[in-house]
Amino acid sequence: MTKAKNLFIALLAISAFLLPGTVSAPRASAESATVIRFASLAPAGSAFMKVMKAWNRSLKKATDNRVELRFYSGGSQGDERDFIRKVRAGQMDAAGVSTTGLGVVARPVLVLTAPGLITEYEQLERARTALDDRFKKLFADAGFVHLNWGDAGKNRIFSANEFVKPSDLKSCRPWAWKDDPVFAEYINVIGANPVRLGVPEVYPGLQTRMVDTVPASAIIAVALQWYTRLKYMANANFGIILGGAIIKQEKFDELSEADQKALRETSLRAGKANDALSRRDDGRAYRSMVERGMVEVDLNPHKAEWDAVAQKARENLAGRVYSKSLLEAVEKVINSK
C-alpha cells in the first residue's frame, strides 16, 4: 500500500524551496480562517506533504491568514474516485489527483493523454495554453475549479517480457487502471486483454505475474519500485502522464475575489515548479534504470505499426471519451508552428 501511495508524490513532487512566500505569517484564529480540506494519497511526513505545507504557508501569507489548506494525507480518504465522491458530497473541498482523477471529473480532458497524440512537453504546453478556457469549462460544468496542471513524466511501456512490435504484447498480461479507458483501448486495439487493477494492486500483481506489462513514466516506475519486477522499457513514449489540483466550485465561491486570486496564483506557481522538476527527474530516472540493467527497446524499426495502433485507439475513443471536435482542436494546436 505504501508504494501505491507514493504515486501521487511522483505525479506532483515539487521542492519547497521553489515555492515563493514560504515564511510563516502569524496564525489567525480558527474562526477567522476559511479552511480548505484537501485530500491526497501522499503519506504524512513525505516530501510531497512538506511541499504542500509550504504551499499552505504561501497561501496563508498571501491572504493574511484568511485561507488555509488542511491536508488529509496518506490515502486516508480512499483513492482518487473516493476523493471526487467526497468532494461532491461536501466531506472534502479539494484534491490532488492524477490524470485518472481528472478524468473522473471531466472525462474529455483525457484527450490530452490520447495514445500518440502528445508525446513532447512543448506540445503539451501549447495544447493546455491554447485550449485552457475549453478545459476550464469542462471542470466548471462538473462543479469544480481546476487550479493547476502537473505532469509526471513520459508514459511508456515497461514489460517483464521482450517486445519490439505491438503484436508481441498479445501474449502479455498488461495492466490498465480501473478508471483509465485510454490505455485499455490502446491494449484492446493491439489485441491483448488488459488486466484491470487499482494502483495498490499493481506491485503485488507483478510479483505474482498476474500482470507483466505496465504503462508508466520512468519516475513512477522507480517511485513505486515496479522497475524491480520488469526488464524491458520502450525508448519511445506514447503520451505524457498528467495530474493537477481541483477544488469544488461552491468552496471556491466562499472566498473573496482577492483570496481566489491568491489561491490560483500560489497553485499555479506550484504546478510550474512541479513541471520543471518532474521532467528533469523523469530523465534521470530513465538513465538510472538503464545503468541498473533495464533493457531499452528500440521501437523505431516498427514505428509504423505502433503509430497505426495509436491512431486507431484515438479514433475509437473519439465520441466515447472525448468529442471528435476536441480531438481535432488538440491536433490543430500541436501541429501548428
Image (tube, helix red, strand yellow):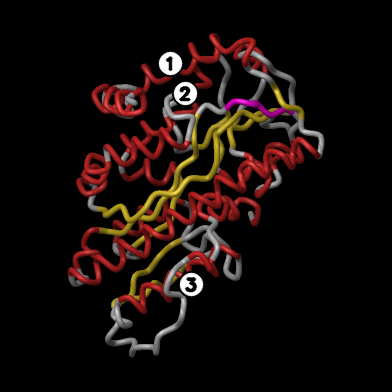
Badge number at residue 311? 1
Whole-percent x and y of residue 110?
Answer: 38, 35
Whether the magenta-drawn stretch holds residue 207 is answered as no
Quarter of the image with the C terminus is top left
- Type of amino acid under label 3: Lys
Question: Do the residues bearing badges 1 and 2 touch, measured as CB atoms within 8 Å?
Answer: yes
Position above or below: 135 against 167: below
Secondary element at image label 3? helix
Q: CA distance from mark 1 to mark 3?
A: 42 Å
Q: Residue at x 43, y 36 (%)?
A: 122
State how far apart marks 2 and 3 are (Cα): 36 Å
Q: Position of residue 144 (x, y in %)?
A: 26, 53
Name the image quarter holding residue 288.
Answer: top right
Q: Earlier in the sequence, mark 1 or mark 3?
A: 3
Chain part drawn in magenta:
232-236
Q: Which residue is mark 2?
A: 116
Res. 173 image quadrant = top right
